[in-house]
Image (tube, rainbow, N blue to C red):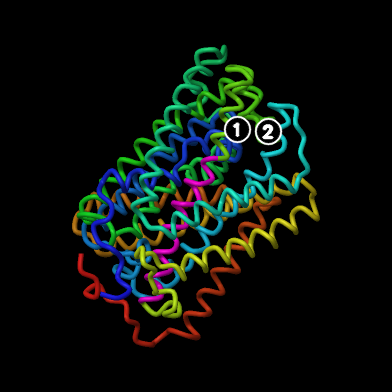
């Protein structure tokens, strides 16, 4: 059938490794930990709360995945339980979420490239070289998405295995050689405001990539079984890794010194070099460049399926429904690349012109917060939806309600701080949400939409 995604492309292991590309433990090591460190010495506790919250939200996806599977992903769950208007809103919030992910990954690597290279090797290159190098490294990732799921997840298996091995070995090395080992990082030593600020800006964000496989429902084998299992498996795997990483960095840097951690551009590189040496630090730098591929590959793959489904359901023009010879929605991929490129050029120019090189740190924090807030909204919607179509009081109502309470507490602590750049994140989300709602009520409200569960056979 024309414009139909290729069935049975990924099995359980393929789903896990494809999703792990966005859950990159190496990126947690030097990227997400930088914003999770707003929790200061309690960063490991913030990651523990993040894992609990993720298991609760993962339960929601697990329960929904047993009932329906499609390229719609999250917005399919929202449409099924709360109606097409909520599904429309969720589909566009998901676009914002994944574009924000692409943006904060891009801005982070530009931010650390020159300082890390100079710190390790003493080589200082012009600023724009790092922009060119990182931009060129993104291209193979988009090309592999164009080639299809099977070559993508095969490459993910190799790179993710290398990542996991490295972070485990180096984390253990840092812990063994540290003199600050204690259970203090698992207590709210820095206060609850700092704890939940670290949770929403970093630790919860570190787990959110597991949802990237939800839009692969039409391409997975036995999706109503395998997607839910893969989600829970990924949360547990990355949960253990992130607890190890965050604890290693806190004790390696010094519990009482964590108020300086987020003020440094490359704190993780400093910790690694002080505990493992310059050669290991150089390997860490090289691996950081390589994982740009895995991050962009998983994010773009997920987003293109979401856009494809939106086109099929009348939420976007039908041109984004077209597939190439590899059964990939190529127009959706082009749209993703265009939105990312325009956003990177405009946003990067503004932050750089106003704040010079340090602007990339503010840009990184802003987009990381947009991503966290967006995904928390999506999970609030799906939690509410599952409670509405509940079959089991415990798994479909009680656990989603606990998850929503944790999310609302995190929101409270985030919106209690209207400082820069958090204020920008909140304004972006507010303006974007108003725009989505306005478009729905002016263009689609009251109209017949093509979205229907029976037009997809799994």
Residue sitting at x 56%, y 72%? 434
Tags 1 and 2 touching, CB below 8 Å: yes
Which quadrant of the rendered structure holds the C terminus? bottom left
Using residue 149 as the reference point, say whether residue 31 is left or right of it: right
Residue sitting at x 60%, y 21%? 279
- Is residue 414 visible in the rendered image? The answer is no
Mark 2, residue position = 116
- Using the rendered view, name the quadrant where residue 218 is placed: bottom left
Residue sitting at x 67%, y 51%? 363
What count of labels does the image hold?
Answer: 2
SS type, badge 2 = helix
Mark 1, residue position = 285
Q: Position of residue 383 (x, y in %)?
A: 35, 57
Q: In this view, does 341 lie above or below 36?
A: below
Residue sitting at x 74%, y 58%? 349
Secondary structure predominantly adopted by residues drawn in magenta? helix
Q: Give yes or no for residue 293 being in the magenta stretch.
A: yes
- Is residue 294 visible in the rendered image? The answer is yes
Q: Position of residue 283 (x, y in %)?
A: 56, 28
Which residue is nearer to you in this view: 400 or 129?
Answer: 129
- Few, some or many residues within 10 Å of mark 2 (<14, 14–19, 20+): many
- Using the rendered view, name the quadrant where residue 3 is placed: bottom left
- Few, some or many residues within 10 Å of mark 1 (<14, 14–19, 20+): some
Q: Look at the image and give the residue range highlighted in magenta.
A: 290-312
């Amino acid at each position: 059938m024309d414009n139909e995604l290729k069935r049975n492309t990924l099995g359980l292991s393929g789903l896990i490794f494809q999703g792990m590309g966005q859950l990159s433990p190496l990126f947690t090591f030097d990227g997400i930990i930088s914003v999770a460190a707003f929790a200061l010495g309690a960063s490991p506790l913030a990651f523990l709360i993040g894992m609990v919250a993720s298991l609760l939200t993962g339960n929601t996806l697990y329960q929904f995945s047993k009932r329906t599977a499609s390229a719609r992903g999250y917005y399919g769950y929202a449409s099924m339980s709360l109606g097409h208007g909520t599904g429309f809103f969720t589909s566009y919030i998901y676009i914002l979420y994944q574009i924000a992910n692409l943006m904060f990954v891009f801005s982070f690597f530009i931010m650390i490239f020159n300082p890390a290279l100079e710190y390790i090797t003493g080589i200082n290159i012009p600023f724009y070289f790092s922009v060119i190098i990182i931009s060129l490294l993104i291209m193979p990732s988009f090309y592999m998405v164009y080639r299809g799921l099977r070559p993508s997840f095969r490459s993910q298996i190799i790179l993710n295995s290398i990542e996991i091995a490295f972070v485990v070995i180096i984390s253990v090395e840092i812990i063994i050689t540290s003199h600050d080992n204690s259970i203090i990082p698992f207590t709210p030593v820095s206060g609850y405001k700092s704890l939940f600020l670290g949770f929403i800006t970093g630790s919860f964000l570190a787990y959110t990539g597991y949802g990237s496989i939800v839009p692969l429902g039409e391409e997975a084998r036995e999706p109503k079984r395998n997607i839910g299992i893969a989600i829970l498996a990924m949360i547990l795997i990355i949960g253990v890794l992130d607890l190890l990483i965050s604890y290693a960095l806190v004790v390696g840097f010094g519990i009482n010194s964590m108020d300086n951690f987020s003020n440094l551009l490359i704190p993780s590189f400093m910790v690694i070099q002080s505990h493992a040496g310059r050669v290991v630090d150089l390997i860490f730098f090289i691996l950081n460049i390589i994982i740009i591929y895995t991050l962009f590959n998983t994010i773009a793959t997920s987003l293109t399926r979401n856009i494809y489904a939106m086109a099929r359901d009348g939420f976007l023009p039908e041109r984004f429904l077209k597939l190439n010879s590899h059964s990939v929605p190529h127009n959706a991929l082009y749209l993703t690349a265009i939105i990312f490129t325009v956003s990177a050029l405009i946003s990067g120019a503004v932050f750089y012109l106003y704040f010079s090189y340090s602007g990339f740190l503010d840009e990184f924090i802003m987009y990381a917060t947009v991503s966290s807030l967006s995904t928390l909204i999506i999970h609030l919607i799906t939690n509410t939806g599952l409670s509405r179509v509940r079959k089991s009081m415990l798994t479909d109502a009680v656990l989603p309600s606990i998850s929503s309470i944790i999310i609302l507490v995190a929101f409270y602590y985030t919106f209690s701080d209207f400082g820069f750049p958090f204020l920008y994140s909140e304004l972006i989300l507010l303006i974007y949400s108003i725009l989505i709602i306005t478009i729905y009520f002016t263009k689609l409200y009251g109209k017949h939409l093509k979205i229907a569960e029976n037009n997809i056979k799994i």
